[in-house]
Image (cartoon, rainbow, N blue to C red):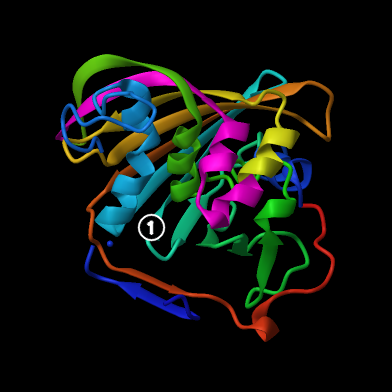
Amino acid sequence: MVERQHRQGGGAVAVAAAAAGLMVCATGCTGSGAAAEDGRSADDPVEVLQQASAALVRAGSSRARTSMQMATGGTRVTIRGEGAYNFRQQVGRLKVLLPQDPAGATEHRPITELLADGALYMKNRGGGVPADKWVRVDTATLSDGNLVTGGATDPLAAAELLRGTRKATYVGQTSVAGTRVRHYRGTADLREAAGRASKGNRGPLRAAAKGFARTEVPFDAYLDDQGRIRKVRHRFSFVNGQRQGTVAVSSTTLLYDFGAPVDVRLPDAEDIFAGKIADE
């Protein structure tokens, strides 16, 4: 049941205005051998990756670390986040750390982000916003579907993007944070991912398919023996609305401690800032 208060302990303003503002301005595999409806084996890399988000929902929740790196105009900046996500309720909480300004003189306050079905809530985001107020963004209205805007890709959206996998290869076994994983490399299509995504992510992924410079998204995914994503790295490409040219973004999501409790309280209406956000 999705309410203002979310707890789980059983299983864990547009791209130019937000993404560029955050970054540029800082310048299951199921059973082995099982057959899929389309004739693919569950051991086929494409089929395995398309089912990876379902394995996360079965897991219930996890802790998450994120890293987003943008390269533009000869400058490379990195934004990091940490928190937890409930895949069944599709809610999460992240603390996002912004880089210093190019001169190294400004230390940004961490941004608290609440990820919810169709919405992104941010505190300490934007000039002129009172310290006790939240900024709410409808993710389906963002030209990147919140894959980039918040400085961290929504963990479930990152997983459901793999539903659009068109081609993939199995690279081999390796380890992530001490856990044995299978490494896959491939390309996903945003339009196909949107068509196969859960209801809450269809709108945002459709928006990303229209707003990104390319709908094809190269990725590297690392799955454990239960088919759960332990790490996934996407490479996005979008047109910078503030400056001409295409911006390359690498977004990495690391998932661990499955079944960790997730405590998210969505803001009440009176706690959401309704005024104009000043440029920082």
- Please, what secondary structure does the residue beneath circle 1 have? loop
Q: Which residue is rendered at x = 33% and y = 35% of the image?
A: 231
Q: Which residue is rendered at x = 24% and y = 70% of the image?
A: 9
Count of picture labels: 1
Q: Is residue 70 magenta?
A: no
Where is residue 39? Give x, y as percent.
34, 24
In the displayed structure image, the side of residue 183 where residue 233 appears, left or right: right
The span shown in magenta is 178-204
In the displayed structure image, the side of residue 248 where residue 275 appears, left or right: right
Q: Residues within 10 Å of mark 1 (few under 14, many from 20)?
A: many
Where is residue 183? Give x, y as percent.
28, 22
Q: Which residue is rendered at x = 62% and y = 62% of the image?
A: 119
Q: Is residue 54 above or below residue 112?
A: above
Q: Is residue 189 above or below residue 138?
A: above
Label 1, on which residue? 87
Q: Is residue 138 above or below residue 47?
A: below
* Picture quadrant where residue 71 is located: top right
Q: Is residue 188 magenta?
A: yes
Q: Which residue is rendered at x = 62% and y = 43% of the image?
A: 205
Is residue 218 visible in the rendered image? The answer is: yes
**For the N terminus, which image quadrant?**
bottom left
* Picture quadrant where residue 269 is located: bottom right
Q: Nearer the viewer, residue 238 or 20?
A: 238
Q: Amino acid at mark 1?
A: Phe
